[in-house]
Image (cartoon, helix red, strand yellow):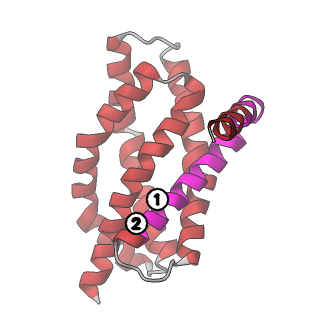
Amino acid sequence: MSEIVSEAWRKYLIQLQSHPLRTKAITSGVLAGCSDAIAQKISGIKKLQLRRLLLIMLYGFAYAGPFGHFLHKLMDVIFKGKKDNKTIAKKVLVEQLTSSPWNNMVFMTYYGLVIEGRPWNLVRSKVRKDYPSIQLTAWKFWPIVGWVNYQYMPLQFRVLFHSFVASCWAIFLNLKARSAVIKQA
């Protein structure tokens, strides 16, 4: 079994080296799909909602993976690849004040409009209501993840690490979004 895993990892690293954007996008999409399947199961959905799962995968593939790829490249350019504690603190701060609020807003909006198919006025109302608590929770969680990512992960693995942790975060966001739907029903 370990030979199979080792060979799969070796092939993944080759793809990551040869086609970094594509590999990160696919990885993000697959992890987003896994997190949604878990969120659906935890929330008590009896039959897997395939449409929802595929739309979550699309979000990971088309948005989250590419966004992370370019964000981490940009951060290394801005901070010239430095890894001292002061620079890492600045990277985390910049990420938390820019991409964290943006990504949570984008996800909530995408979830409401595309996945749930709700009209804009209901989505806007839900975002206004839930966004502050979600963002405050994110600021309790993501700075630690960001610190570990910038301190210990090489550039090519940052999106993989971030996507893996984001899968756990997405379960939280999915359950939060789902709980509002159940309350309204």
Q: Which mark is residue 69?
A: none
Q: Amino acid at mark 1?
A: Ser
Q: Nearer the viewer, residue 179 or 100?
A: 179
Against 132, is 154 above or below?
above
Q: Position of residue 77 (x, y in %)?
A: 56, 19
Q: Which residue is mark 1?
A: 35
Question: What residue appears at the point 37 percent right and 19 percent down from the top-left corner?
Answer: 88
In which quadrant of the rendered image does the N terminus lie? top right
Would residue 88 appear left or right of 10 to someone viewing this image? Answer: left
Q: Nearer the viewer, residue 158 or 89?
A: 158
Q: Amino acid at mark 2?
A: Ala
The kind of secondary structure element at disc 2 is helix
Principal secondary structure, stretch drawn in magenta: helix
Q: Position of residue 138 (x, y in %)?
A: 29, 47
The kind of secondary structure element at disc 1 is helix
Disc 1 + disc 2, Cβ < 8 Å: yes
| Disc 2: CA contacts within 10 A as few (<14), some (14-19) or many (>=20) | many
Instruction: Tell me the quarter of the picture where residue 10 sits.
Output: top right
Question: What residue appears at the point 71 percent right and 35 percent down from the top-left corner?
Answer: 7
Question: What residue appears at the point 27 percent right and 56 percent down from the top-left corner?
Answer: 134
The segment highlighted magenta reads: 11-40
Question: What residue appears at the point 38 percent right and 65 percent down from the top-left corner?
Answer: 174
Q: Position of residue 9 (x, y in %)?
A: 66, 35
